[in-house]
Image (spheres, coloured by chain):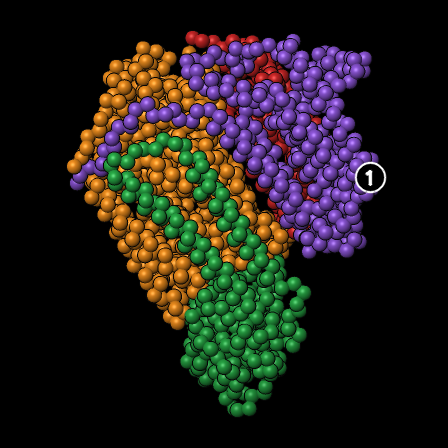
Chain colours: A orange, B red, C purple, D green
Amino acid sequence: MTVKPDTTTAASAPRAADDAVGERLSETWPEEHGLWAWFTTVDHKKIGRRYMVTAAAYFVLAGVAALVMRTQLAGPNGDVVDPELFDQLFSLHGTAMIFLFATPMLFGFGNFLVPLMLGTRDMAFPRLNAFGYWVFAAAGILMFGSLLFEAAPNAGWFAYVPLSGSDHSPGYNLDVYTLGLLFLGVSTTAGAINFIVTALKLRAPGMSLNRVPVFVWAIVVTSFMVIFALPPLNVANAMLFLDRRFGTNFFDTAEGGDAVLWQHLFWLFGHPDVYIIVLPALGIVSAIVPTFSRRAIAAYPLIVLATVATGIISFGVWVHHMFAVGLPDLSLTFFSAASLIITVPAGIQVFCWLGTMLMGRLVLNVAMLWVLGFIVLFVLGGVTGVMFAIVPFDQQTTDSYFVVAHFHYVLFGGAVFPIIAGLFYWWPKFTGRMTSRRGGLWSFWLTFAGFNLAFFPMHISGLLGMPRRIYVYPGDTGWTVWNLLSTLGAYLLTVGLLVTLGTLVHSLRRGERATDDPWGGETLEWAATSPPKVYNLPVIPTAHSLTPMWDERSLASFTDGIADDERVLAHQHAVLRTSELDGRLEHPPLEMPEDSPLPLVVAASLFAGTLALLLGWYEGTLVLLVAVAALCWWLWPHRSPIPEDGADGGGGQT
Amino acid sequence: MNAVDMRSVSRATEPEALATERPRGRTPAWWGMVLLITTEVVLFAVLLASYFFVQFTTEGPWPPGGIRTPELRLPLIMTVLLLSSSAPMAWADRAIRRGYQGQLAAGLALALLLGAAFLTLQGIEYDTKLAEFTWTSYAYGSLFYAITGFHGFHVAAGLFMIGFTLVGTLRGRYTYERHERVRQVAFYWHAIDGLWILILSSLYLSPHV
Amino acid sequence: MHMTVLAHATTEQPAWWNTAATAGGLGAFVAAYAGGLRVLGRRGRSEKLVPEHASEQAPGQAPNQVSDPAPDQAAEHASALWRGVERHGHLRVLAFAAALAALAVALLSPLETAAETYFSAHMVQHMLLIAVAAPLLAVGAPGLPLLLSLPPRLRRAVGGRLVRWRRRPPGRAFAHALAHPVTAWFLHIGVLWAWHMPAAYDATLHSEAVHVIEHLSFVLTSWLLWWHVATPGRARMRGPVAAMYLFTVLLPSAALGAVLTLAPAPLYAEQAARTEHAGADALADQQLAGLVMWVPADVLYLLAIVGLVFAWVSGHRTATPLTATPPEVIHDASP
Amino acid sequence: MAACDSSAPSTLSPAGPAARQITGLWWLLFWISAVVSVVVFVLLGRAVLRGRRAGERVNTRSGNRFVLIMGVALPVLVLAGVYVVGLRDMRALQHDGEPAAYTVEVVGHKWWWEVRYPDDGAVTANEIHIPAGEPVDLELTTEDVNHSLWVPELAPKVDLIAGRTNTLRLEADEPGEYRGQCAEFCGLQHANMAFIVVAHPPEEFRSWLANESEPAPEPDTQPAAEGLEVLESSSCATCHTVRGTEAGGTLGPDLTHLAGRRYLGAGAVPNNPGHLAGWISDAQSIKPGNEMPPQPLPSEDLQALLAYLETLE
């Protein structure tokens, strides 16, 4: 039986405001259609949805690669694919899942939700936002397209030198990897800058930093991590590309270079990167748990602190991926301790959720079910991570399937489960449709069962001495049964994901129409219509608490603001600007740019330039001049009635 | 419209106000540029860390393989040029806050000239150094040219931005109430200067220590 | 092996009279400081050096459009709490005393002797100066109280000239520049890295005078840095800003520690020779020194960051009590 | 020689002091993890059950204390304890000061292991022979890309990094054969870069080593003599060394005592006449991508070569 919500307290004020001023706002924030609009839109909601759909497509492709791998490994002496293809499959699988699926998917969530949660109308740099998406989409095409030419990356997702150098990996495979990631890095950096600036400057009045939703905190911390972590990867990739093509010797040990330098650089990025993936996912959980516990998140300062601390500490643990390299024991003990310390913030978050649920009244929705599954899997994966932090144990199990099990538990359980939970939770907001409960239950249990069947046996095969990244194994090693179980689990998992996908897509046509606030959520995105109008909120509210939708004063500000032109801003395509710490209103409002083809043009030029570099046709990189010209046009100071034109001033120059 | 009171803006950017709550009153564009600069600074920090990592793991003399220790005369001249280009840049920035477009143009042009002189000298330096060692000469050569070349690229980008801003100035796009972009460009330019100090200390001075 | 280094460093105990003399000297300073603090406090109450302000706003700030007193009220409560502590001054006196104690331990204890031989002991010295003494000095803020403890003529001679110079353009410009957090950052990091260059470091081993200058520059620059973060009063940074500021200080300090820890060979020839001569492994000693700089720097800074953020976030009301029961939640749609 | 089953490598069945230490560590970590997980699952279950009772009030306390105790204090205690245990085990694995009975140089090549006994002049491939009960130091270097040497039953793995030399101490309690494999991804045939550690009784080991140090004996039969000629005159000699003959190539494994090896191609196939013939004729089909090209010899030459290689004990 479906219980209709009591919308009188929760959604009536925003709805009334929308009825009052929505007409005027639609003039300055028009809903646009058509192919031209499709290519030139800078609306954060559309871009967010595109991120998610594109990332999901890349997930399917990478997932299919995983299934082929598992089929090959189902039994000993597998003959499904040859070693060259297997190497490309697992390398592309890992690279794509992490760079092309997990991070962009979460950035897609952020793109859609952050401005809504903050009570503003768009991201700080809308054109930069669009540019970031196009670059991401093109980078994925570049990397998956390489598989067609048997030139997909084939040295693993961390491409250790010297194997990835030109001596041992001639061909385009690793050039696709280095240039693809450099290209993709542009997109990620752009997105990160956008999130930080949006969260610092474009919040609703009254929303001081200690009233910002945990999800936004997570995205902001993640974005700062991107700013600090991505450069090591970019440097490493650039160095490797130069080594391969132009004869430099950064990593050539015969010429004074150092093979371990690559490992340091990669993991300086790589470890923060896994937290870049998981922190927004934990933010999603922190958004869902209070709603379905019917109370605000417990120990808010602690969970914010845990998020910040995780971000900082994650830069001090990178060597735990290199315990077998032969580094001095003294430094290993330090990194071992740091790896254990990073566990504490994770524990804080887990027990914050548990505390919230225990002190509240749990409502077991599909989204909440995925969250419960997440907690189970994340803790299981997390505790195996703690095991790795102990140096002798890591030295025994590194590069084994025990590691594969750990990171699939924390990546799939810790990232994909919250993503799916977020999809079920915000699906009404994304699409205006409600999902089927029965479909959701089937998809969850199939996925949960399939996942555990697929990945739990890997712990055992790892302990039984099975190294990772092997395309074949003999029959007398005792690994066969565990690998067969793993493969069966992968197929079951696929079925579960198919049901999940089916459930979500089915609701698009047949799903029940959603109200504005179907779950009675506590944050501001539920004040908007489902799906939101172009202008998001009719009135920019005043946030009086951490849970504005449950706060009568915040809700009243919608009604009060109808008559206040400074809160409606109907006469200009602009958003309110507030101070960084306290959320005090600053003048003047920030003017927002209109739709523009420039992001697409710049992205396409960059893509063309990358291709020219990849193929060694260096004159072709002159196409980047198109990007420069478009950037000049983009950044040209146009005349505007508003005095300060800081809208896109700093962005897009990446 | 609500025009911003100029006196209060300048007061809000005085050191005392900065000391209490520095980020207050900054525009989103300022933050965007700060973050962009941060990524660049981290990038150079990583490059320089790689330089020192390779140095420390190399047995024997540094620079290796008979490459001479970098001479300091030309780099110090370049340093003077680059650092002195910051002054006109700061002057231009302050000038436009008071609405003096002519001074803005003059300051930008001067910075452009000094920066171009820096790049020219760097090219001359490359001319002599490439005869001694290239980017394929040991990891040292690779790192030396990568770091200085990447910085030179940034200087060129900064020069382009200055030129771009200069064109905008000459077309009257910047006034006392509309000058945020000048501030961003100045900030970027100062950051490049600061990075050169790091590079100078690491690549040129530290082998002599 | 590393424990052996530390054992060597602390074998020799000071004579009791040296310790007592040191304690006496420190006591003298603390007594003077406490006296000045009382004067400052008395003046503050009776003549009100600082007039009461209506709000927290800095001059030139755009008017506050938010008609919500809650954050301001919370800030008033917090500052009233702080004034309560200030009133007694115990925290400041203790901080100043602890700072002097840290300086004494660093400079006058057997650590000083060990520092001549062991790099790691030397680094412990530096960390005590930079990460312990400096923050405590900043919290204690002894400048003004000590000045007020002087006799009137001397006070006028020193303080009067100082404040008059401070008012004039050169002094004001210098003070402004010095009061800028970025200046403090560059000074601190620059001094830290400069003194750890091989040539500079070996110079401190050769000449005691250079060594004193090194220590003095460490204390002064890190004091200036922590002044921005921890000084009692209005000149202090807000919690999140201070946290980010310390984070940017943390990175280069930790990087220096990482260099020392991960370097495959001893970097300072003279230091290595002394350590080897004393029977310890020079590389192990250096790695320990690097870790001393790396780990305490990280831990102390991280604790400070965590404390600053936590205090700031929880200082305000994070969530008002639910004025109404949240609406009943809808369940997922039926198929 | 008492040969144990060389299959089924497992960290859970340690056969050496180092691995035994770690297996103990694993079980400790396992039980701690189990307890932590159960605690979380119990709390989770309680929350779900509490949510089912519709009358339950929503508690509006901040929850700081609960989180500080459960999420900070307890984990810190547990982690501190675990850390100390880890340090203790690290220390135990360092074995400072105790000299090794032998030093063996292991050089990683792309997809096979070169094993040298420098003191005795013996060179073999893909088999590390050690005396049981005596510690042996392996000096690990690589000729090309990174590899990682891992014998799960005996010791934790150590990487072979380009440009660096690492040391691994290996000790087996009992005689037997222990399967090992390369653990760091090194290219196409990473999967077929296995090796076995053969632990002998000490006396037997010394006689094996003495035999292995000897050059190849002169062939005593006509077919074998012809085989030697084939070996020396064909391209084998440019890649392989057979001490005591003119064959002196260094690109492939030393074949001086080939007949004594259990496997060919780093564990790709067992060593018997059929596989040897197949390997020589077309190593690429057995181990695709490896550095040995197909050697299509005339059938008489192949037979003679096989006859000779069978004498290389």
Residue in the picture at 46% in, 81% down: D302
Instruction: Quickly name the residue at label 1.
Output: C17
Q: In this view, does A150 lie to the left or right of C55?
A: left
Which residue is more in the foreground, D62 or A457? D62
Classed neighbour count for the residue bearing mark 1: other residues with Cα under 10 Å, few (<14), some (14–19), many (≥20): few
Residue D188 in view, yes or no: no
Q: x, y (%) of residue C258?
A: 63, 45
Residue in the picture at 54% in, 24% down: C238
Judge whether C297 appears above or below A480 on screen: above
Judge whether C117 appears above or below A650 on screen: below
What amino acid is found at the position of numbered circle 1 in the picture? Trp
Q: Is mark 1 on a helix, strand or loop?
A: helix
Q: In this view, does A417 lie to the left or right of A227?
A: left
Residue in the picture at 70% in, 16% down: C39
Q: x, y (%) of residue A229?
A: 51, 40
Residue in the picture at 44% in, 82% down: D273
Disc 1: which chain?
C
Judge whether D269 appears above or below A207 on screen: below
Q: x, y (%) of residue D116?
A: 60, 72
Judge whether A524 appears above or below A392 on screen: above
Q: Which quadrant of the view contains residue A133?
A: top left
Q: Which quadrant of the view contains residue A81?
A: bottom left
Instruction: For the N terminus of chain C, give its image quadrant.
Output: bottom right
Instruction: For the C terminus of chain C, give its image quadrant.
Output: top left
